Image: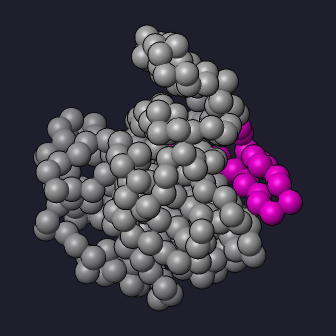
């Protein structure tokens, strides 16, 4: 297993459109571990398309409980189970993630019970350990540590950036956040910062297509970061590479990589990756 960050879904928000990208999910292969970060719609297919067998599912981290980050958590775990998962999997998420998992198990109780009895499968509920986390150290192993920082994503309070360190590398994932200066200290010296990003000139387009008008605009501006804001955090943190992810808009043909690069150019002149589904970043 080669160490790499694979962007599975790079779209901000839960809507999907023909030919467009999927909502947020990532696979981090690091320190001989397979780490899934967020489980937006499409994560199971995205993992399979990387060549990974879902039987090898290992660690799962959820940054917050918005649907574009957690909608396919239950289906991913269930699909791994029906694929032949034989070992325990640990899911780390903010307060409320246990209820999400319990609700999924209740909704699929008939199917799960039938497959246990009819196909001889182990009990899915007993294979999954769910850990609710807050700020601070989330996972502390000899070869891998994960630390969480609460970020600013109103009205969601339990939303966390994650710092993953292993195999001599550090990667920081912003989660969804408004511009948040403490994130620069949290990401100080990281090899890679994966940060959400919006294009100011793209907001009206997404509002027209999604609806809710002024209220949606208010939410986006109050709860998310423009590309230039992400670049400023990367600059202050002195990271090795900035990866723009959770893009808003991500599926509008009027806006492409040239617009994202132009948005960060006044602030960031270091290595830059504009996220797209299936992109592999070797570590």
Q: In the picture provided, is 199 more to the left or to the right than 35?
A: left
Is 147 covered by the magenta stretch? Answer: yes
Measuring from the top left, give residue 53's x and y in whole percent. 49, 52
**How is the model colour-coded?**
one colour
Residue under the point 68% across and 37% down: 88
User: Position of 159 compared to 254: left or right?
Assistant: right
The extreme right residue here reads: 142
Q: Nearer the viewer, residue 97 or 282?
A: 282
Q: Does the magenta stretch include residue 227?
A: no
Q: Is residue 260 left or right of residue 195?
A: left
Rendered-image quadrant of the N terminus: bottom right
Up/down of 80 relative to 253, above or below:
above
Question: Vertical placement of 240 versus 141: above or below?
Answer: below
Horizontal and vertical percent for residue 245?
Answer: 41, 62
Q: Residue at x 66, y 58 (%)?
A: 33
User: In the picture provided, is 12 more to the left or to the right than 102?
Assistant: left
Q: In which quarter of the image is the C terminus?
A: bottom right
The image position of residue 247, as x and y in percent, is 34, 60
Give the percent coordinates (x, y) of residue 129.
69, 31
In the image, which residues are magenta? 132-155
Residue under the image location 83 percent in, 55 percent down: 141
């Amino acid at each position: 297993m080669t160490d790499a960050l694979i962007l599975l879904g790079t779209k901000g928000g839960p809507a999907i459109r023909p030919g467009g990208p999927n909502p947020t999910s990532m696979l981090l292969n690091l320190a001989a571990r397979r780490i899934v970060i967020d489980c937006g719609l499409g994560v199971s297919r995205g993992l399979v398309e990387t060549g990974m067998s879902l039987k090898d599912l290992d660690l799962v981290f959820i940054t917050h409980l918005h649907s574009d980050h957690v909608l396919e958590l239950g289906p991913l775990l269930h699909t791994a189970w029906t694929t032949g998962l034989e070992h325990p999997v640990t899911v780390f998420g903010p307060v409320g993630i246990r209820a999400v998992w319990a609700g999924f198990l209740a909704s699929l109780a008939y199917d799960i019970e039938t497959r246990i009895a009819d196909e001889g499968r182990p009990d899915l509920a007993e294979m999954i350990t769910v850990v609710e986390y807050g700020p601070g150290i989330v996972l502390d192993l000899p070869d891998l540590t994960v630390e969480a920082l609460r970020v600013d994503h109103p009205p969601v309070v339990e939303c966390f950036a994650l710092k993953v360190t292993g195999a001599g590398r550090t990667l920081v994932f912003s989660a969804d956040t408004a511009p948040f200066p403490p994130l620069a200290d949290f990401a100080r010296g990281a090899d890679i910062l994966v940060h959400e990003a919006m294009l100011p000139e793209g907001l009206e387009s997404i509002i027209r297509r999604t609806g809710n008008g002024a209220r949606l605009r208010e939410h986006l501006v109050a709860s998310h970061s423009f590309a230039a804001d992400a670049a400023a955090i990367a600059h202050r943190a002195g990271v090795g590479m900035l990866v723009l992810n959770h893009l808003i808009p991500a599926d509008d043909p009027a806006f492409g990589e040239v617009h994202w690069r132009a948005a960060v150019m006044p602030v960031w002149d270091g290595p830059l990756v504009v996220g797209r589904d299936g992109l592999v970043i070797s570590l």
